[in-house]
Amino acid sequence: MVTLEDHQLAADLATRAGEVLLDIRARLAADGAPAAVLKHEGDQRSHEFLMEALAEVRPDDAVLSEEGTAHDCHPDRGTTSRTWIIDPVDGTREYSEPPRTDWAVHVALAVDGQPAVGAVALPALGCTLATDEPPSATDLPPIPARPRMVVSRSRPPAEALAVCDALGGVLVEMGSAGAKAMAVVRGEVDCYVHSGGQFEWDNCAPTAVALATGLHASRIDGSPLTYDHPDPYLPDLVICRAELADAVLAALATSPAPEA
């Protein structure tokens, strides 16, 4: 069972963790700290804040965090149908390069494996997108003649490039997974395709928000994204405007096999 308070909690915690991260980044950057220190301190302090908060207000729920395990201060994941899946800093590289804004905080709740609740804070942009008051895809602008495909700066997956070619689209480079997914939610781009390696904490909250918004979200073979598996590896996903889903999945069906 999911309550309105669960949705509100996710949004509140993601926002507050983002505030913690902004304070840390400003302080350490002013002191001239190297990127490695920003990454470590940001990850650790945000993780501690989120784990302590969830232990206090949801003591019977499990937690899966990129920076820890459910054993930190919560029950084992196998003992409950409710698991909070969190990424204390999604995009530590981008976070460690102020004033970059393309990083995020993810707070999600999977219930019986479904991405039921989610919040993605974009702290450097001063906004949080969440399932408590999700945006509506009906409010997004029309899809341009050349759809915009968001990809990583360093190594865009072959599948994304194939979809971009099939749709006659244009590439938009961006940092973290959460920033990319929320760019679709915000109408800044039209499609996000990833393959070759993510974990549940990378995409559970973005998936929950995208679905609540009315976007398409799935694996690249079109199957549903499910969570809280014993192995949290979840290497691929598609988040796109619903109007593009059939064309995107058709292009993926004929693209090269994804990387392991």
Image (cartoon, rainbow, N blue to C red):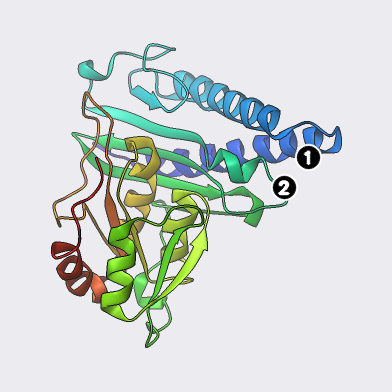
Answer yes or no: is residue 4 visible.
no
Instruction: Give residue 148's mark.
Output: none
Report helix, strand or loop for mark 1. helix
* Placement of 67 over or under 18, stated as above or below: above
Residue nearest the observer in this picture, 209 or 167: 167
Q: Earlier in the sequence, mark 1 or mark 2?
A: 1
Residue type (three-letter) at the residue carrying disc 2: Pro
In the current view of this chain or complex, which residue is farthest to the bottom?
A: 145
Residue type (three-letter) at the residue carrying disc 1: Ala
For label 2, count other residues whose C-alpha is less than 10 Å away and answer few (under 14), some (14-19) or many (20+). some
Q: Check disc 1 and report the residue beneath it.
A: 26
Picture quarter containing residue 86? top left
* Rendering coords of residue 119 (x, y %): 44, 46
Report helix, strand or loop for mark 2. loop
Answer yes or no: is residue 179 visible.
yes
Residue nearest the observer in this picture, 238 or 124: 238
* Rendering coords of residue 249 (x, y %): 18, 66
Tell me, yes or no, whether the two marked residues, 1 and 2, touch with CB atoms within 8 Å. yes
Q: Check disc 2 and report the residue beneath it.
A: 98
